[in-house]
């Protein structure tokens, strides 16, 4: 509902620190999302809480962690506050930051409220991110979209796909638009799964199998030809063996997209997965993030 109140912890930092702050929050079990203001050079990072009391509790926990993080961040955070925001204000703030853009050779991401011109052959991915920040512009998501586009050209339509950490559902929608089938998706956050379902339904795809689950517990209905794990490096490293149960390695040519990895973390992730038998095929470095596409056999 538009008048619903959202309870959040808002952290304002320098734009340069936003990616690292997300990673630090993830290691402390605080899933977060951020957007940058290119005019001010600042970034706002949010943790969503269930109610006002929980937001205050999260705020105090995060403030207590700041001394341990100070040597890693380039500058002190400007603020860490618990805030209440109306759903409509949240939506309006996103309309200021989310605009149509080309994510890959064929995929163009367009917010539901915006009009735009397109080229012949473009595949239009219309999205309303809601409470989830999966707009596709983040370097990790853009890399995944580019890999999905390239892989579809290589292996053709009808390949199965798993979206691990689905967020707003943008990768699942892109997969369906590109011809992947069947498509499965999961996220540990029930709100993300609800938003994915809404966006998939709006896009006309009611046949994607969605689940609320942690990566360590998830069992896909079937192993998939292509798997995208856009999760953050700490989770990829900790649960590498479990993640490698998702691709259909026995088909002879399965692919694993690993994303959510800061540039300086990528080599450790690459070594972890190549030691388990994966072969690195390609990489993408977009801003502070490096993503890799691996063949699994």
Image: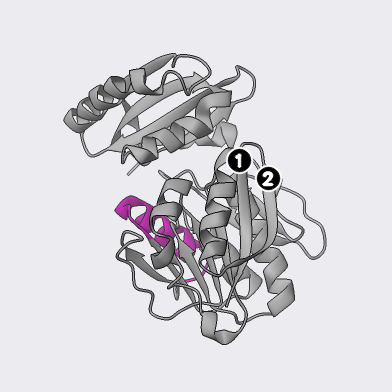
Could you tell me which quadrant the N terminus lies in? Answer: top left
Whole-percent x, y for residue 241 in the image: 41, 66
Q: Which residue is drawn at 36% across and 42% down?
A: 31
Q: What element carries label 1?
A: helix
- Residue 269 counted in the magenta span: no
Residue in the foreground of this view, choosing between 95 and 245: 245
Counting from the top left corner in percent of width and height, residue 247 is at: 50, 74
Across and down, in percent, residue 42 comes to: 55, 20
Checking the image for residue 247, the label placed there is none
Residue depicted at 31% across the width and 41% down the height = 29
Asked whether the residues under the numbered discs 1 and 2 touch, taking CB atoms below 8 Å apart as contact, a structural biologist would say: yes
Residue 122 placement, left or right of 137: right
Give the image quarter of residue 149. Answer: bottom right
Q: Answer left or right for 258 relative to 151.
A: left
Q: Identify the residue at image location x=42%, y=18%.
A: 70
Q: Position of residue 283 (x, y in %)?
A: 68, 54
At 45% from the left and 20% from the top, the residue drawn is 12
Image coloring type: one colour
Q: Name the residue under label 2.
A: 285
Read off the residue under disc 1: 263
Which residues are the magenta region?
Answer: 187-205
Q: Identify which residue, 213 or 3, lies in the foreground.
A: 213
Considering every residue shown, the one lying at the far right of the view is 120
Residue 137 is at least partly visible in this image:
no
For the residues labelled 1 and 2, the Cα–Cα distance comes to 7 Å
- Looking at this view, is 80 or 289 the one in front? 289
């Amino acid at each position: 509902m538009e008048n619903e109140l959202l309870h959040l912890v808002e952290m304002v930092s320098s734009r340069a620190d936003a990616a690292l702050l997300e990673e630090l929050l993830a290691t402390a079990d605080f899933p977060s999302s951020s957007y940058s203001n290119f005019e001010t050079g600042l970034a706002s990072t949010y943790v969503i809480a269930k109610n006002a009391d929980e937001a205050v509790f999260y705020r105090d926990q995060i403030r207590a962690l700041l001394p341990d993080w100070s040597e890693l961040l380039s500058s002190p955070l400007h603020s860490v506050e618990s805030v209440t925001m109306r759903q409509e204000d949240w939506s309006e703030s996103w309309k200021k930051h989310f605009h149509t853009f080309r994510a890959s050779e064929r995929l163009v991401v367009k917010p539901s409220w915006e009009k735009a011109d397109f080229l012949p052959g473009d595949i239009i991915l219309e999205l309303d991110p809601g409470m989830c920040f999966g707009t596709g512009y983040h370097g990790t998501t853009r890399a995944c979209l580019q890999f999905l586009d390239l892989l579809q050209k290589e292996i053709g339509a009808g390949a199965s796909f798993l979206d691990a950490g689905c967020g707003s559902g943008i990768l699942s929608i892109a997969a369906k638009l590109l011809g992947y089938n069947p498509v499965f998706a999961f996220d540990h956050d029930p709100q993300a799964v609800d938003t994915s379902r809404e966006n998939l339904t709006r896009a006309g795809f009611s046949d994607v199998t969605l689940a609320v689950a942690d990566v360590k517990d998830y069992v896909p209905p079937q192993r998939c030809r292509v798997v995208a794990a856009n999760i953050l490096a700490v989770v990829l490293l900790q649960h590498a063996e479990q993640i490698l149960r998702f691709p259909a390695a026995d088909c002879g040519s399965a692919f694993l997209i690993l994303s959510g990895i800061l540039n300086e973390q990528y080599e450790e992730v690459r070594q972890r997965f190549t030691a388990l038998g994966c072969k690195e095929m390609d990489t993408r470095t977009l801003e502070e993030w490096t993503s890799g596409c691996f063949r699994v056999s």
